[in-house]
Structures are given as C-alpha cells and as structure tokens.
Amino acid sequence: MALKGTLDGETRRAALLDLASERGGLHLSEAAQLWGVHPMTIRRDFEVLESIGRVRRVRGGIVPVEADAFGARQGRNLRAKERIAEKIVPLLPDGGAVGLDSSTTAYVLADALPADSRFTVVTNGLSAFESLARLGGVRAYLTGGEREEQNLSLVGALTLSAFGAFHFDASVISALGVHGESGTSESTLAQAAVKDAMARASATVILAVDSTKLQSRARVRALTLDRIDTLVTDLDPADERLDPYRELVGRIH
C-alpha cells in the first residue's frame, strides 16, 4: 500500500531521509513503492539529497552521511576489512615507504601490522596514526591539513603537499565506491584530491575495498582503474563479482 503519495517534494525528501537514517539505508524501488510514485521521482529525490551532502549514493539506493561517520563505519563489515588487511600485509615491501589513507580499512590494516614492522608510513588518518605510533619499529608521519570530522582525517593543500614530499613503494587506498566503468569515487573533492596525490607519489597503488563497494559510485570521481596496480577485496579472487575489473587492474587478491 502506498504511503504519503500526496506529499510535496521537500516534505517527501525529508521523510525519505528520516527513513534512510532509521534503517541505515534505503533502496530506490522500495521507496517508490512506499510513496506511490514513479522510481524516477525517487531517483531525483536521491540526487537532491546527495547534492546537499545528506546521503551517499550506493547501488540501487542511498546511505545517509550521518550513518556513515567514521565511528559508525569502524565496526561495519569488520571481518571483511580484517580479511583485506591479512591479504595486504604480505604485499607491503619489507622496510619500505607506505602511504595510507584515512579509511576505516586503512585503520584496520594499521592495527594489523606485525609488532616488528619496519615500515615508514605516511597517513592523513588520525585513527591510523594512533595505531601506527604504538609500533616501535614503524616511523610514522601524520600529514598536516584541515581536520575533516566525518573521516577523522586531514585534507587540503598541506595534506597534498605532505604526500607529494615522499616516494612511496606502495600506497594503500580505499574508496566509497569502485565501478568498472568510472573507477573509484569519493564523497568530497577534498578526499578525491588526497587519493590522487597518494597515487601520484606511489610506485604501486593498492586499492582496498570490501565487496559492498563493488559496482557502486559516490558523487566525486577519484582514480581511474588504469592507475590501480592491485585490487584487494574480502572475496575469493575467482569470485564472479570481480569480473568487471579483471582486464582493468594489474592483479586481484
């Protein structure tokens, strides 16, 4: 049975956001059925909510930005992120220089590095830096920049300059979305610029994303897939969900 079908656009969008916040997300087809309107109407509502920074678009629906804050995301898909970290540790060059972004996946990786690690690691992630600082053998650098609360990260010109001052053997970069056609994407231009700076400074770029990010897009383009050397997910490398990326990246783990 359709609900609230006669609401004006602004009121409907507020109700959509309330429901998405309550559930942690909302699917387009379900919203169209509940509100008794055409899916294109809901799609336009989603686009408006995304344009004002209230939601992030995912495959088939939306996730509210408020529910996507760093603290909430730390525990989401944790086993998948731990599996990704397990795969990445052997890929990192012993004693090498590593760039690490501010994602929750990077935080899990920093927490999973062996106690005797001898890396030089540069990160713009405040939580990752705290974990790295506890490893006596790791020389950890925190970039300067402007604090971005949603990701507990540093962004801006100082951040880009800091990453550009290094030659990384490898950088580990996550993303809000990764799509076979458009590459990786982020919620803000500032985050996309950070990922670009890291990739430019790196001999090897490792993209670390859990399977929920596959074939999804956020609103800001970041890296094209030809800039990715290795894609690491929680899936078995033979999983068919990775087929769209096989000819576009160097290796899949």
Image (cartoon, helix red, strand yellow):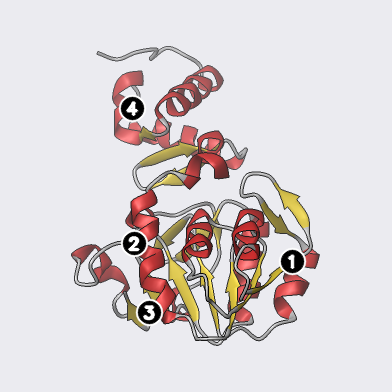
Q: Which residue is mark 4?
A: 32
Residue positioned 68% across, 44% down in the render: 149
Using a 10 Å C-alpha cutoff, classify the residue at mark 2 as few (fewer than 14 neighbours), some (14 to 19) or many (20 or more). some
Q: Which residue is mark 2?
A: 83
Residue 128 occupies which quadrant of the picture? bottom right
Instruction: Give the x, y percent position of residue 161.
Output: 77, 73
* Amino acid bearing label 1: Thr
User: Is 74 or 213 nearer to us in this picture?
Assistant: 74
Residue positioned 52% across, 41% down in the render: 68
Nearer-N-terminus badge (4/3): 4
Nearer-N-terminus badge (2/3): 2
Q: Nearer the viewer, mark 2 or mark 3?
A: 2
Disc marking residue 249: 3
Nearer-N-terminus badge (1/4): 4
Residue positioned 51% across, 35% down in the render: 67
Instruction: Give the x, y percent position of residue 27.
Output: 34, 35
User: Is 23 or 41 nearer to us in this picture?
Assistant: 23
Q: In the displayed structure, would residue 162 be above or below residue 192?
A: below
Using a 10 Å C-alpha cutoff, classify the residue at mark 3 as few (fewer than 14 neighbours), some (14 to 19) or many (20 or more). some
Instruction: Give the x, y percent position of residue 229.
Output: 43, 81
Quadrant into which the C terminus falls: bottom left
* Amino acid bearing label 3: Val
Nearer-N-terminus badge (1/2): 2
Q: CA distance from mark 3 to mark 1?
A: 28 Å
Q: Which residue is mark 1?
A: 143
